[in-house]
Image: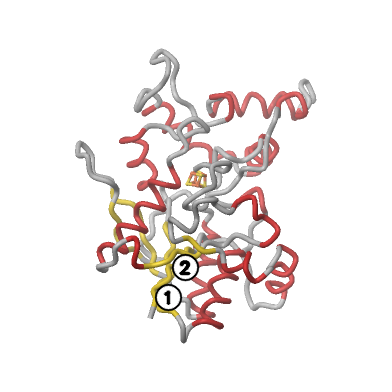
Amino acid sequence: METVVLSFSGGRTSAYMTKYMLDNYKDKYNFIVLFANTGQEHPKTLDFVHNCDKYFNFNTVWIEAVVHHGQRKGNTAKVVTYDTADREGTPFEEVIKKHGVPNKSFPMCTRELKQRPIMSYMRSLGYKPRNYKIALGIRADETRRVSTSARQKNVIYPLVDAGVDKDMILDWWKDQEFDLEILEHQGNCTWCWKKSDRKHFLNIEENPSWYEFPKRMEKLYNHVGPQKDKSIPRNFFRFNRDTETMFKLYELSKNNIIPISKIEHGYGCSESCEIFPTEETNG
Ligand code: SF4
C-alpha cells in the first residue's frame, strides 16, 4: 500500500483534509498524520490538534525540529506529545540561532521547523523521499498556493481535487463537537512575520506578550546569517522593521496619527505556512 503523509498544520482546513482522507481512503493508503510544532503556536491550536486525536482518532505524531549546531547537518526531528510539546519557542530559537532571523528575504522557518523535520522523521522510519506522498491542506478556492513542481516533490492536494472550498469547511466545522477556538489573525505562530500590519496591530492590542519572543530573538540574533549589508540587522517584519518599530506604528495608527492605509503598503495574499510552498508564498 502506498504511504501518504497527512501534513496537519493545526488549522481547520488541514484537519478537514485529514478526516476526509482517513474516512475515504483508509483501504487504499497507509496514512501517517504529522504535526510539526514550532513552539510559538497559539495554545488553542495545540488543544485543537489534541481534540482531533481524541474525537477523530487521527493518531497524530507530534514532532519538533532538532537543530545540529556547528555541523553541516540538516534538522532532524524528535517526537513529542500534547503534554510535552514546547510552548516557549525552543525549536524556533534553535533554528534562529543557526540560520538567523527569518523574514521576507530569508523565509526559511517553515522549511527548517516543518519540512525538514517531517522528511527526517520519515527517513527515520525507513522511507526515502520518493517512497511516499505528502498531502497538504490547500482548498479549491486557493489554487494559487498549489506548487507548480508538486508532482516532482510528490506533493498532493486532496481538497483541490475534491473541490472543497472554505465555506464547505466552515459549514462542516459548525456541526462538530469542538472547533479551533481562535480567530484568523491569531493563527499559525501567533506573531508570524507574514501577517499583515492590520493583523499585527490587532494582536499587539489584544496580546502584546506574544511579541516578546520576536523582540528577544532580534536582540540576540539579528546579526546571525547572511545579510547584504552586514551593518544592517536582520529583523522579522515587512521592510525589515523590528518588533519595537511595530509597536510604535501600532501606537501611531491607534491614535490616528498615521492611518493604517499609509503604513501597510503592497501587502499581497501570501500569508501561509505550508511546507513545499509555491514560489509566490515562499516560506
Ligand atoms: S512562516 Fe510564520 S507560521 Fe510558519 S513557521 Fe514561520 S513564523 Fe511560524
> Contact, CB < 8 Å: mark 2 with mark 1?
yes
Instruction: Label 2, secondary structure: give it.
Output: strand
Query: According to the image, label 2 marks what residue?
Result: 6
Q: Which sits earlier in the primary sequence, circle 2 or circle 1? A: 2
Alpha carbon distance from label 2 to label 1? 7 Å
For badge 1, the amino acid type reads Phe
Compared to residue 109, the image places residue 275 above or below, namely below
Which quadrant of the figure has residue 243?
top right
Where residue 79 sits: x, y (%)? 31, 63
Where residue 94 sits: x, y (%)? 32, 42
Query: Disc count in the image?
Result: 2
Query: According to the image, label 1 marks what residue?
Result: 31
Where residue 219 sits: x, y (%)? 41, 26
Return the residue nearer the eye: 271 or 46. 271
Query: 10 Å neighbourhood of mark 2: few (<14), some, or many (≥20)?
Result: many
For badge 2, the amino acid type reads Leu
For this orientation, the residue located farthest to the bottom is 27
Which quadrant of the figure has residue 36?
bottom left
Tell me the quarter of the image containing the N terminus.
Answer: bottom left
For this orientation, the residue located farthest to the top is 231
In-image side of 74 versus 240 (left or right): left
Residue at the spot 71% in from the left edge and 67% down from the top edge: 170
Instruction: Label 1, secondary structure: give it.
Output: strand
In-image side of 81 versus 176 (left or right): left
Where residue 43 sits: x, y (%)? 52, 57
Residue at the spot 43% in from the left edge and 51% down from the top edge: 38
